[in-house]
Image (cartoon, rainbow, N blue to C red):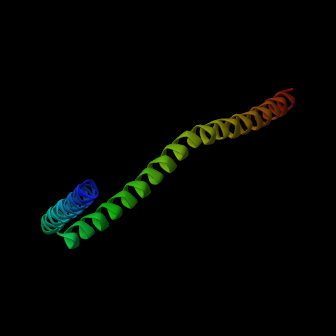
Amino acid sequence: MFILFKIVKVRLRVDSLARCSWKCSVARTVGHLSKSAEVMKLLNNLMKAPQVAATMQEFTKEMTKAGVIEEMVNEAVDDALDSEDIEEETEEEIDKENADDDEELEEMRARLARVRS
């Protein structure tokens, strides 16, 4: 009977220690959560969400402008590169006109030679 009493006593002590350990764990967890909440509150105060939102909107506008400017620059470069094609076409037209003028000049010379003869 004495051994049974000792076993029950030891078991109660183990249960008591387990409960105490669990309570300590819960208390530590509550402490950590409390500290985390404080840190988050401080960060929230430092961050100033409305200012961050305004900054992000401004950043978005600037990035949009940059995209538009980049698009305009790309178009200008493309137009500049296309101008070489226009120059070639212009030169071809001038050559055609010069060829037509050369033919007219030859015709005039032929007429002039006929009139002289």
Residue in the foreground of this view, choosing between 63 and 36: 36
Q: Residue furthest toward the bottom?
A: 50
Within the image, what quadrant is residue 78 found in? top right
- Residue at 75%, 32% (x, y): give it: 102
- If the image is split into quadrants, where does the C terminus sit? top right
Residue in the foreground of this view, choosing between 105 and 6: 6
Within the image, what quadrant is residue 93 found in? top right
Q: Is residue 54 left or right of residue 101?
A: left
Spot occupied by residue 74 in the image (x, y as percentages of width and height): 49, 47
Residue in the foreground of this view, choosing between 41 and 4: 4
Residue in the foreground of this view, choosing between 74 and 43: 43
Q: Is residue 61 left or right of residue 19?
A: right
Spot occupied by residue 24 in the image (x, y as percentages of width and height): 18, 60
Above or below, 82 against 27 in this view is: above
Spot occupied by residue 81 in the image (x, y as percentages of width and height): 55, 39
Above or below, 27 against 91 in this view is: below
Give the number of callouts: 0
Within the image, what quadrant is residue 111 found in? top right
- If the image is split into quadrants, where does the N terminus sit? bottom left
- Residue at 39%, 60% (x, y): give it: 64
